[in-house]
Amino acid sequence: MALHKSMIVAKSDLRMALKVSYVKYGLIGIAALGPIMMILTIGSIIILDPLSAEFVIPLMDAIMSPMLGMIAIIPAALISANALVGEREQNTLEPLLCTPLTDKELLLGKLLSSFIPSIVLLLGGIVITEIATIAICISMGVPIILVPGVAGLFLLLTAGPIMLVAIVSIMILISGKVKRVYEAYQTSGAVVMIFILPMMLPMISMDETGMVLMDLVWMSNIITLLIAIILAVVTWALALSRFNRDTMISM
């Protein structure tokens, strides 16, 4: 029942966010950017040097896979930046805060409104990239290569969703503090940069010769996952503890 109430909030919140052209077209562009960049990179490698592609691409996977995760973080920040301040600008915040929803149900609804479309974009990007890579390999007559590979999938399917929870939680807090939507969007840029940094950790998994070390990739993936868990727990706890209906109504 609580989840059902939160989903109602999430649907309403997402509809409101998509009314903002900056958010709507930003989501479309971002959704396409990650897969296109990866497919073009992989396709270029296979076409230019098909003989070495099966060795080069798995090594580059540690660099390319985090890109999909980083790009999924951006729409989460855009939507959640609109979570509370957008309601205030449209004069719907006070009625929302006066509903019988508990703070946790309300916050969960706000989180889901950003998390669900972002995770859909992330999973969609993974599927599209995998299918496109397989199609390119078959058309060029080279052994099938999965991109993202196992290590990349581990990173994206574990740390990715958890990092989304973290950034949405902190952006909801920020959205409740600022007075204008554009202020929340401006702040979201800095927040995205901070939360993207852990996702970049696997990109430095190279030795002095420039070769990617898979043991180091896995280690950095696990470290990234642990960082994501800590950030998600801390930010969600902050969101729950700092959420104050009375303060927001009086603003």
Image (cartoon, helix red, strand yellow):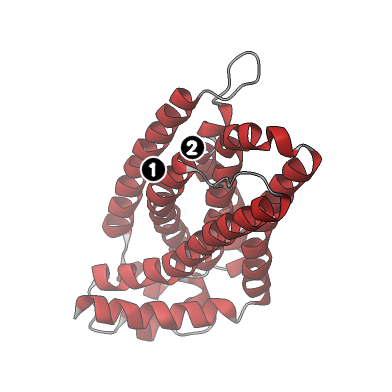
Q: Identify the residue at image location x=37%, y=86%.
A: 95
Question: Which of disc 2 and disc 1 is earlier in sequence?
Answer: 2
- Answer with left or right where residue 86 lies relative to residue 136: left
Q: Circles 1 and 2: CB distance less than 8 Å?
A: yes
Rendered position, 10 above or below 209: below
- Answer with left or right where residue 159 lies relative to residue 188: left
- Answer with left or right where residue 108 lies relative to residue 217: left
Rendered position, 182 above or below 16: above
Residue 44 figure quarter: top right
Residue 200 circle label: none
Residue extending furthest toward the left: 1
Seen from the viewer's position, the closer of residues 161 and 132 is 132
Disc 1 residue crowd, few under 14, some 14–19, many 20+, Cα 10 Å: many
Identify which amino acid the numbered label 2 is placed on.
Answer: Pro
Q: Visible in this render: residue 34?
A: no
Seen from the viewer's position, the closer of residues 217 and 10 is 217
Q: Identify the residue at image location x=34%, y=73%.
A: 109
Seen from the viewer's position, the closer of residues 105 and 117 is 117
Q: Which residue is mark 2?
A: 198
- How far across and down, in percent of the image, does residue 189 sit? 61, 52
Q: Which residue is mark 1?
A: 228
Identify which amino acid the numbered label 1 is placed on.
Answer: Ala
Seen from the viewer's position, the closer of residues 174 and 63 is 63
Q: Identify the residue at image location x=32%, y=51%.
A: 238
Locate the C terminus by quadrant. bottom left
Residue extending furthest toward the top: 208
Rendered position, 63 above or below 77: above
Dot 2 falls on a residue whose secondary structure is helix
Q: Identify the residue at image location x=31%, y=57%.
A: 242
Residue extending furthest toward the right: 48
